[in-house]
Amino acid sequence: MTGFDRMLGGVPVMAILRGYGAERTVALARRAWELGVTCVEVPLQTERDAEALAALVDAARPHGHPVGAGTILDVEGAQRAQELGAVFTVSPGLDADVARASLGLGMPHLPGVATATEVHQARKLGLEWLKAFPASDIGAEWITAMLAPFPEARFVATGGVSARNAKIFLEAGARAVAVGSALDDPAQLPMLQRILAARSES
């Protein structure tokens, strides 16, 4: 078992911590870890984000939790992610150069897809785990539809997903959902716990 199979195969939730700064990012990641969400992405767009990513990598290392870099738009971004200690990369769209660069650096890559053509192209690049984005716009039924011609695809529903609607995407066939603000909302934390508990029992 390698890559995202290992990181997300047993836990159907990934955390995305965008723009929080180093201290708050680490605090929210610790909350995620306590819930059982071990896979955390930090979108890498500014130097402040780079500081947050590096701080989280340091905090996660003793626990062996995977930390990745998101919003990777070019080869240089993938290289920067590796330098900061990320172990996987995520992009909002599908770019073959970014995918190859990330894989070449030993980092599993999660590209954004929203059409059958993009899913097909991603599969030709050898990518099985795909980011269904923006999930709230394309809808849970899109995932079900894509699994018919691409049954081997493993979708992570991302974009507009919260603890309130995560179950809809998981029931539609998504292997995982990516949440962000849910970790900063006390009202959603019990919902996340129920989602994780239900999956661990299934």
Image: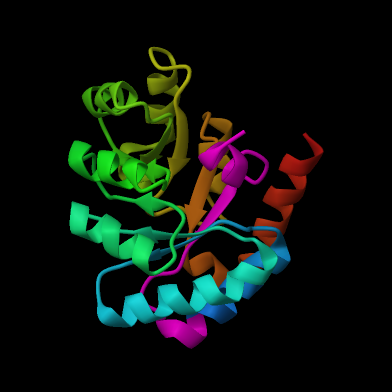
Q: Does 172 appear above or below 109?
A: above
Side of 11 where 142 appears, left or right? left
The total of numbered circles placed on residues is 0
**Looking at this view, is 8 or 13 the one in front?**
8
Residue furthest toward the top?
149
- Say left or right for 40 vs 123: right
Tell me the residue at 50%/84% (across/down): 24
| Percent position of residue 197, x then y | 77, 49
Residue 195 position, x and y percent, is 68, 49
Q: Residue at x 42, y 43 (%)?
A: 108
- Give above or below for 65 relative to 201: below
Q: In this view, does 55 lie to the left or right of 47?
A: right
Q: Does the magenta stretch include residue 13?
A: yes
Q: In this view, does 151 lie above or below 78?
A: above
Residue appearing at x 51%, y 47% in the figure:
177
Viewer-nearest residue: 124 or 144 = 124
Which region shows up in magenta?
1-24
183 with respect to 118 (left or right)? right
User: Where's the C terminus, which quadrant?
Assistant: top right
Residue found at the very far right of the displayed protein: 201
**Residue 104 shows in the view:** yes
Q: Is residue 84 magenta?
A: no
- 53 versus 166 height, above or below: below
x and y percent of residue 40 in the render? Answer: 52, 61
